[in-house]
Image: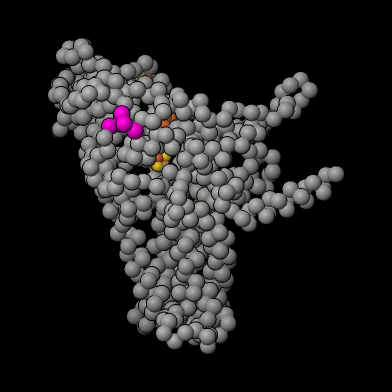
Amino acid sequence: MSDQTVHFKIWRGDAKGGGFRDYSTECTEGMVVLDAVHDVQREQAVDLACRWNCKAGKCGSCSAEINGLPKLMCMARLSELPTEKPITIEPIKAFPIVKDLITDVSWNFEVKKRIKKFKPRPPDAPDGTWRMQQEDIDRVQEFRKCIECFLCQDVCHVLRDHHLHDRFIGPRFLIYAAALEMHPLDVEDRTDELRNAHGIGYCNITKCCTKVCPENIQITDNGIIPLKERVVDKFYDPLGWIWRAWKKKSDRTRKP
Amino acid sequence: MSHAEIAAPPRAFGQTMRRDVWWLQPALVFCGLSIFIVYSTWAAFQGANYFFGNYVSPFYSPELFGSSPHSWFGPKPGWWPNWLLFSPALLILWAPGGFRLTCYYYRGAYYKAFWADPPACTVGEPRSTYWGERSFPLIMQNVHRYFLYIALIFIGILAYDVWKALWFANGFGIGVGTIVLAINVVLLGGYTFGCHSLRHLIGGFRDNLARSTTSFACYRCVSCLNKRHMLWAWMSLFWVGFSDLYVRLCSLGVWHDFRII
Ligand code: SF4
Ligand code: SF4
Ligand code: FES
Ligand code: FES
């Protein structure tokens, strides 16, 4: 992208209301949306509020909606956006506005506290250590890449459009629960909560969360669907209940 | 703490700030699935031209009762009510139909394309109420694994049809129809063996997955197919329809089956 003037529509306002305001700035090779927002902040709107930290796609603070799609501002290259029309930048929609591009995401931290903590089985060795297979850990490691940008929470229509914050924990916390639930050492059972308090049934697997995740976590396929299957095991599969009861019994008779 | 009151008001149906052609994908899904549903329903109600020599259309296999030589238990049963239309396909199509209807991929796809729930990511929805898959009727989607069990049996039956398609009146041979039916089994296999429920049942339910080597190896194979589940779903859907069309047109004398060997 050669140097050119790029036009933006940036949402300005607070909890009481607001709207788009027009800004333009010179853009050079390699610039990202966050650079442009900083230019605007420096040159035209010193009171423009935006949150950022790392500018490397790792802190998860600069989440916004760029041309209607949830993205990290620091990872959105201007050269990859159409510049014929002004680029729109809005705050994320699933959480209350604080000011301009900043939203109050504290609900997420409250939700996290409600998920049952890691509960390891007794140590495998007398020195208090455990043994696990790398492959088992790889499966949960994927979910630990999460940077808590909450873009997936923003795009999820259950929160974004239906505002079911009190009944559904959202994709970010479903994979957080998956990371604990599938952990090879963990012995806690979270399926009851997943079905009831956490509302996994509200997810209709439309995969918007997976599409926006900047860490490319396969939220739906590797996290939510396997959890839904675990819920089916426990609540909706009569043949499975019989099979497991029989297996438990035969295991017990085998090891006296 | 509920944030319902403070979050942004919901957007109107179709409202979005997106600039791309967001409606294209749901529109393609809508057209693709609609064409398949219309064709397969029409084909299932025909009750004729579903076999050609040693080939039998996958829509009609297994043929439990019917007038073709492929029928398992003879012609239409006497107890079948006269007023009720009979076609061998209607006896079995509920199984693959139910399997696809409750498939995790298709669910996500048709909720968007047919029910606009949402029409596309970040696009406003037509309804303000939402139940998800938590209550009736969509809670029924949880039966998916039972349809999977039947679908696995069907793969065996369709594989046997390919075997039969290798034996012509004058002995062993391979015709274009044999290849069409063989590709059908491969594609349906790729779709069925990549099922999310199978991935769970074969090993995904374990936390210490790698401890059991066989189960882990199977889990890895299923996961590998599962990564492209959407692609397998579409390819197998198209091909199963085409296989029926091929057999049908051969049987009607419109196409001539070319014998390769
Ligand atoms: S797949 Fe489920 S969690 Fe993800 S965006 Fe869609 S409804 Fe929300
Ligand atoms: S799962 Fe992905 S999109 Fe969601 S909060 Fe974590 S990094 Fe962000
Ligand atoms: S500033 Fe850290 S992710 Fe964008
Ligand atoms: S999830 Fe698609 S077939 Fe089971």
Image point 39% across, 31% down: which residue? B2
Q: Is residue B212 above or below residue A110?
A: below
Q: Quadrant of residue B213?
A: top right
Quadrant location, the C terminus of chain A:
top right
Q: Is residue A180 visible?
A: yes
Expressed as whole percent of the image width and height from the top left, the position of residue A172 reads 45, 32
Image point 42% across, 34% down: which residue? A166
Expressed as whole percent of the image width and height from the top left, the position of residue B234 reads 40, 57
* B32, B213: nearer the viewer: B32
Please state the total of marks drawn on the protein image: 0
Q: Give the magenta part as a residue range.
A: B4-8
State how the image is colored: one colour
Left or right, A243 with reference to B18? right
Q: Is residue B64 above or below residue B128?
A: below
Image point 31% across, 39% down: which residue? A161
**In the orientation shown, which residue stands out farthest toward the right?**
A256
* B5, A183: nearer the viewer: B5
Q: Is residue A220 above or below residue B261?
A: above
Q: Main secondary structure of the magenta part?
A: loop
Left or right, A167 with reference to B150? left
Expressed as whole percent of the image width and height from the top left, the position of residue B91 reads 49, 74
User: Is residue B164 highlighted in magenta?
Assistant: no
Expressed as whole percent of the image width and height from the top left, the position of residue B130 reads 36, 46
